[in-house]
Amino acid sequence: MATVYDALIIGTGQAGPSLAVRLATSGLKVAIIERNRFGGTCVNTGCIPTKTLVASARAAHIARRAGEYGVMIAAPIAVDMKKVKERKDAVVRKSNEGLEKWLKDIVNLTVYQGHARFVDDRRVRVGEEVLEAEKIFINVGGRAAMPKLPGLDQVRVLNNSSMMDVDFVPEHLIVVGGSYIGLEFAQMYRRFGSEVTIVEMAPRLIQREDEDVSQTIGEILLGEKIRLRLGAECIAFEKRGEKVAVNVECADADKSVVGSHVLLAIGRVPNTDDLGLENTGVGLDQRGYIQVDDQLRTQVSGIFALGDCNGRGAFTHTAYNDYEIVAANLLEGDSRRVSDRITAYALYIDPPLGRAGMSEAEVRKSGRKALLGKRPMTRVGRAVENGETQGFMKVLVDAQSKEILGASLLGIECDEVIHSILDAMYAKAPYTVIQRAMHIHPTVSELIPTMLGEMKPLD
């Protein structure tokens, strides 16, 4: 006999809890199911813990540079990784436990802890119980990919989740994967004191970004004595005593890198393989992501997929926006769509990269007439004053409509500065609106209007 609800939500990542509470407070009888830790990737192994670790790593980095600012620190800078981990764990625990308590205190909302599997299009089994609802929302997230690479099963490797348990400074960390997750961990552990090598199959870092962005990020990392092994033709693993060798077969260098630990950061996969979706009409694509339409509806009426598992975004902010879209459509009679949002994200190395809209390569490929503005951080007063002049800011504009097409801002505080551009893009305002705005001095943002006043045709 099934227990009947108005709505079932599987997973407590960024979309699920807010949707559950919104539905419950609207008077619906709701159940939410979590099989592991409340909060999903962001709270437990993603944004919150990694940015807490990044903050500790930056503190060590600034302490080592104190002399440049006229601050004398007598003792050598040392990092106590046990205390670093304790601080990270405390921040995570507050978010995790706070979320759990919040959900369990909501009227009309029942929390189930266990592994959910679909029985059919309307029923889900959790342990010995069967739950039934006309509306089911899947919010199960994703996990680190473990590809079938030669020798991988013979060595111990870390991923973004298991890195959260590390309470020591690895002697030599080899990061396999030169994209967003890998780069953040590489710089972080270099600043903690590890020797670090990044191994990347592609000829440059973060392939989806423009070449000037990739090159500058590479220079930033090399400046911190992080080794880069790009164009690794055939990655394989081999145990060598207590160490691990990563075969790279680079034509112009040694064939392998030997280190004490390996972090595998080469993509993620959705947590959809053990949900019993084969018992439903819900469709998956070739990579296992749940197929959804522009309003996040699956092929089965009444079943929705939100967050990383739907392949329509891989960030906390896209997952939360999924919740906002579904809630607005179901409860407010709105007609919000995934296609309404503008691509935006950040890379949290130091200095950070803030991205919005199209890249320069995408604008060029589109064939449209465009204007380009670019300014090095060496010509940004706030960056000079802080002694952090690495990077540049770049904005692209449609030459006819004057609307902003995209921006790549790499530099101090650029993860925040990008939002002034993003908001103008959502408003569909011509770039001259920001160009003529009076910004506060001294800030990084004040140079955005200056840069927009120096636009030139994209050749």
Image (spheres, rainbow, N blue to C red):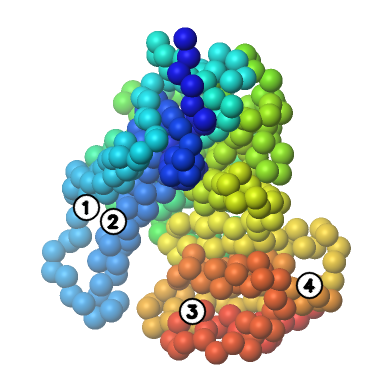
| Side of 82 where 164 appears, left or right | right
Q: Nearer the viewer, residue 314 or 220?
A: 314
The secondary element bearing badge 1 is classed as loop
Q: Answer yes or no: do the residues labelled 2 and 1 have beta carbons within 8 Å?
A: yes
User: Tag 3: Cα neighbours inside 10 Å, few (<14), some, or many (≥20)?
Assistant: many
The Cα atoms of the two marked residues, 1 and 4, are separated by 48 Å
Mark 4 to mark 2 CA distance (whole Å) = 41 Å
Counting residues from the start of the chain, the first of labels 4 and 2 encountered is 2
**Sequence-first disc among 2 and 1:** 2
* Residue identified by numbered label 2: 56
Q: Residue at x 72, y 64 (%)?
A: 360
On the image, the x and y values in percent for residue 114 come to 38, 21
Q: Is residue 260 above or below residue 442?
A: above
Q: Name the residue under label 1.
A: 79
Which residue is identified by label 3?
Answer: 444
Asked whether the beta carbons under mark 4 and mark 2 sit within 8 Å of each other, the answer is no
Q: How far apart are marks 4 and 3 (CA)?
A: 24 Å
Indicate the secondary structure of the residue bearing disc 2: helix
Give the quarter of the image for residue 3: top left
